[in-house]
Image (cartoon, grey):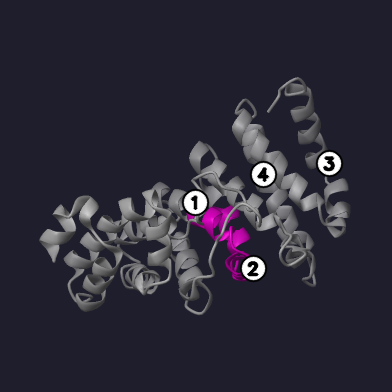
Amino acid sequence: DFTYLTTGGPKLEVRTVEKIMRERRAYPQIVQASIYALRPLLELNDDLREEAQMSQIPQIIVSVMNLGMRDTKIFSDSLQTLMLLLRAKGSHQSSMFSADDYSAPRIEAIIEGDAIAVLLRGMALHINCIKVQSMGCWAMVNLGLNNDHRDALITQGGVETIFTSMRSFPDHRTIQFRGIFALINLCSSSRIQGRSSSDMFTSRASPAPTIKLILHAVIVATRKFIDDIELCNRACTVFYNLALNTENHPFLMDSIPTREILEELKEKYNRSEE
């Protein structure tokens, strides 16, 4: 099995890797080799990724993350594979939520299992690890491409985790960019269900704290990377998505820092086509 996983290359099959992972759970070296072997299959082929999403592979990866949570390498390596597994069909690293463009399947291990809880606990445990925070934010970008995943992530504290990650690495461009990207998808409206996930922020008894976290994180990152047009473009998309829900307007309009950063961006990029 180990030889097959490490030398199989393009001849690897998802169902065979899944079988090995199920039957060799007691052998960490083989399970880790399986997790590595899956990456090129998940990254380059939509059909193979969809096959893996519908198999037992998500549950097994989450189990490895949970059992090996205290080991930074095991957790981060497993998280990287999970991040690739969560991609929607036709999507890529910089995908934003769009009900019409992407087919993001509902993965039972995410909704019925404890995948999100494991992800958020691991990010909290490894708060000082750049790779875990970077991959964790990237995984949340992909979670936001599915309505059910996105809503579960919001409910279980995804926004707070993104805020903590961004606050912990204020000078790390990748974490700031992926954190903002994750917030875009979490705040995006869904035409399928006819609602905005921003509604979930304002449906709580005290909506202001969560929205203030979002605004603070995005404003701080934007000001830090004001010359990064790609990051600033995504930051504006967060503001835009929040503004789609009229109940958020008081928080946006009453936020002096939000108005100030939007004015700065308007002045700086007034003639930019992007």
Sequence-earlier tag: 1 or 3: 1
Q: Looking at the image, is mark 4 or mark 1 nearer the viewer?
A: 1
Q: Looking at the image, is mark 1 or mark 3 nearer the viewer?
A: 1
Measured in 3D between alpha carbons, the distance from the residue under mark 4 to the one under mark 2, in whole angstroms, is 20 Å
* Marker disc for residue 256: 3
Q: Which residue is mark 4?
A: 218
Task: Tell me the residue at 60%/53% (across/down).
Answer: 163
Main secondary-structure element of the magenta-colored stretch: helix
**Quadrant of the rendered image containing residue 153:** bottom right
Sequence-earlier tag: 4 or 2: 2
Q: Which residue is mark 1?
A: 138
Provide the secondary structure element on which disc 1 rests: helix
Measured in 3D between alpha carbons, the distance from the residue under mark 1 to the one under mark 3, in whole angstroms, is 30 Å
Measured in 3D between alpha carbons, the distance from the residue under mark 4 to the one under mark 1, in whole angstroms, is 16 Å
Q: Residues within 10 Å of mark 3 (few under 14, many from 20)?
A: few
Q: Which span is picked out in magenta?
A: 138-164
Q: Is residue 137 left or right of residue 228?
A: left
Residue 156 lies within the magenta run: yes
**Quadrant of the rendered image containing residue 199:** bottom right
Measured in 3D between alpha carbons, the distance from the residue under mark 2 to the one under mark 3, in whole angstroms, is 29 Å
Q: Looking at the image, is mark 2 or mark 3 nearer the viewer?
A: 2
Q: Specify the quadrant that holds the C terminus.
A: top right
Q: Which residue is mark 2?
A: 151
**Callouts 3 and 4 close, C-beta under 8 Å:** no
Q: Amino acid at mark 1?
A: Trp
Pick out the residue farthest to the top: 271
Q: Position of residue 84 (x, y in %)?
A: 41, 55
Q: Amino acid at mark 3?
A: Ile
Measured in 3D between alpha carbons, the distance from the residue under mark 2 to the one under mark 1, in whole angstroms, is 17 Å
Q: Specify the quadrant that holds the N terminus.
A: bottom left
Sequence-earlier tag: 2 or 3: 2
Task: Tell me the residue at 63%/53% (across/down).
Answer: 97
